[in-house]
Image (spheres, rainbow, N blue to C red):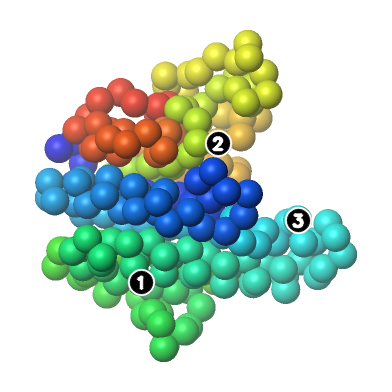
Amino acid sequence: MKYKRILLKLSGESLMGERQYGIDNNRVLQYAHDIKTVFDAGIEIAVVVGGGNIFRGLSAEKSGMERAQADYMGMLATVINCMALQSALEGIGVETRLQSAIKMEQICEPYIRRRAMTHLETGRIVIFGAGTGNPYFTTDTAASLRAIEIKADVVLKGTRVDGIYTADPEKDPTATRYDEISFAEVYAKGLNVMDMTAITLCQENKLPIIVFDMNKAGNFERIANGEAIGTLVR
């Protein structure tokens, strides 16, 4: 396998599957099996999950809700998604630990960097919930930050499309996909890869990002094997 330690970022929307809202258990189980395949190959895996399928702070702000309050609600939504993924993984025999940036002692551990790294080294998948624990930061930023903290080799962003395009491929049929792109080009072209705070963190710490289609079974394993799947940002 190409990587020793991976940070996988899943959007909340990806957990909806074909639904319009909430969690599609079949999609979560598919993700769990894909993650287990890579985990069984000896790769250490941490996961950050978004919450947009349940609640999105920015959308709530536009409707009049105070931004910080809305963002905290979004953080709680991510923990619900993390619990769903944890349940699916443990249901197929994978030992996990859920750590939250907001303390919730009854359901998960508080985020402690050294403890997270010990879990990874011991042979557990670590799932990070509640973003960074701070409003005004996205779960993309949380993924970049946690990846840097745990010394991951790469951030893999699993989405519904197979990479980064010149435009939204779901809206523009003429959009073309990049196989590889630099951080500087992402800035210059204003591409919607991750938010700019997340991109800056990865650029400054020389941490590559791969954007790929997580909905296609086996793609996660192919990337872990070193295949050129999706778009590489470095």
Left or right of 172? Residue 17 is left
Q: Quadrant of residue 192?
A: top right
Residue underneath mark 3: 59
Residue in front for this viewpoint, 136 or 89: 89
Crowd tier of the residue under label 1, counting other residues whose Cα lies within 10 Å: few below 14, some 14–19, many 20 or above: many
Q: Is residue 119 above or below residue 138?
A: below
Confirm whether residue 172 shows in the render: yes
x, y percent for residue 121: 16, 64
What residue is pinned by disc 1? 98
Q: Are marks 3 and 1 in contact (CB under 8 Å)?
A: no
Could you tell me how far apart the alpha carbons at marks 1 and 2 are, in whole angstroms?
26 Å
Q: Position of residue 131 (x, y in %)?
A: 52, 64
In what quadrant of the picture does the C terminus appear? Answer: top left
Which amino acid, by three-letter code, is at mark 3?
Answer: Ser
208 w.r.t. 205: above or below: above
Query: Which label is found at residue 193?
Result: 2
Report helix, strand or loop for mark 1.
strand
Pick whichever of labels 1 and 2 is earlier in the sequence: 1
In what element is the residue under mark 2? loop
Q: From the viewer's perspective, is 4 left or right of 45?
A: left
At a point 30% along the width and 23% down the height, the residue shown is 228
